[in-house]
Each structure stands twice: as structure tokens, then as C-alpha cells.
Amino acid sequence: MAYWLFKTEPDTFSIDDLKSAGEQGTFWEGVRNYQARNFLRDKVQLNDLVFIYHSSCKVPAIVGIAKVTKAAQPDPHQFDSNSDYFDEKSSADNPRWYGVTLKYVQHLKPVSLAAIKANPNIVELALKKASRLSVMPVSEHEWQLLTQA
DNA sequence: GCCAACGTTGGC
DNA sequence: GCCAACGTTGGC
């Protein structure tokens, strides 16, 4: 079992949208970054827990927790020429982009990016430096710190 | 809306 | 394979 942090823009897809999706969950699509893709495809496993982080909004923050209910599958949008996520270099035989399915678990009292940056006990979290990575690992220790914050 | 950081592309 | 130019992300 591992822990992750996934970013989303709440204007596009928020934790409330994830909650609304209920038990069937939501396919986490549209990741188009190789480092993030590698995590999704190779490392994220069924039942892993995921922090949902809201970015590009008033108060960027970790806002809740989700659970992986299905491991990596090819992102169908990469084959759809009408989609913004279309990738002509990808093929069904050798898909380039993947997503996983997440299910809402709970909201958290938001932990803002400012609070994370100010917390001297949080040193490993990639969010502190790699501000552009949209899927990143979270250590168990820091998961504990952040869930009890 | 600005700008820094950084990933990607493409010429050589 | 290097590196400059360019595009995108995301905090502020």
C-alpha cells in the first residue's frame, strides 16, 4: 500500500465532483506528463490512498482523500481526435498515456500549500519543489503528519 | 495578469 | 546529444 498526491484544478474537477461520483468512482484522465504517467502506470496500485490537491485556485491546498479502485488503464482520450487530450503518436497497441480510477473517501480540513511549505517536518514532499508534477508519491510518515494536521 | 520554473521540441 | 526557444503550469 502506498500514498500519493494528485493535483486537480477545482474549476475543472474538484473533490466535490469526486464525491458526487460516489461508489463508481472517477477515471483520473488527462495526465500528459511522463514522470506522472510513470507513477500512474507502474506504481499506483489498487487500494492505495491519494491526497486530492486543489491547484490554480484561491487557496491551493490538500482538501481530502481518495482511494484507488482500479489500477492503470489506457486513457481513451488519447485516441479521440476530437479531444484536447488526443495524441496522434499514441496507438492502441502501445498506449502512451494512462489513468487510474479513484473513489472519494473523505474531506480533510484543508492543508494549504503555505502551511505545507511552513511545516519544517514536511521535507520530502515533491510539492514543495516540483510544483508542476501532477502525480507524486507521499511517504507514510508525511501522510500521517498531513492527515493529523 | 505576471512571471518563475521547468518540461518539451527541434535545429544543428 | 546539446541547447536555445518555446509552451505550460501554477503560485502570487
Image (cartoon, coloured by chain):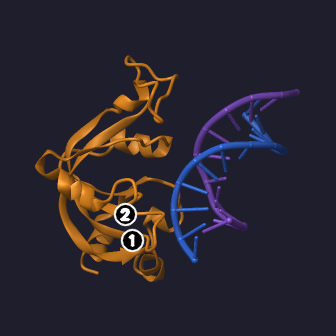
Chain colours: A orange, B purple, C blue
Q: Secondary structure at mark 2?
A: strand
Quadrant for the C terminus of chain A, please. bottom left
In the displayed structure, would residue A143 be above or below residue A23? below
> Do discs 1 and 2 share a chain?
yes
In the displayed structure, would residue A62 be above or below residue C5? below
Taking A7 as reference, is A89 left or right?
right
Of the pair A124 and A18, the residue shown nearer to us: A18
Of the pair A84 and A101, the residue shown nearer to us: A84
Q: Residue furthest left?
A: A23
Rendering coords of residue A46 (x, y %): 19, 45
Rendering coords of residue B11 (x, y %): 83, 28
Residue at the image position 39 percent from the left and 56 percent from the top: A8
Residue at the image position 39 percent from the left and 31 percent from the top: A77
Of the pair B6 and A42, the residue shown nearer to us: B6
- Amino acid type at circle 1 is Ala
Residue at the image position 51 percent from the left and 22 percent from the top: A88
One can see residue A32 in this view: yes
Q: Chain of mark 2?
A: A
Earlier-in-chain disc, 1 versus 2: 2
Dot 1, crowdedness within 10 Å: few (<14), some or many (≥20)?
A: many
Q: Chain of mark 1?
A: A
Residue at the image position 19 percent from the left and 55 percent from the top: A20
Residue ID for mark 2: A53
Residue A61: give its label. 1
In the displayed structure, would residue A27 be above or below residue A115? above
Of the pair A116 and A108, the residue shown nearer to us: A108
Q: Are marks 1 and 2 in contact (CB under 8 Å)?
A: yes
One can see residue A49 in this view: no
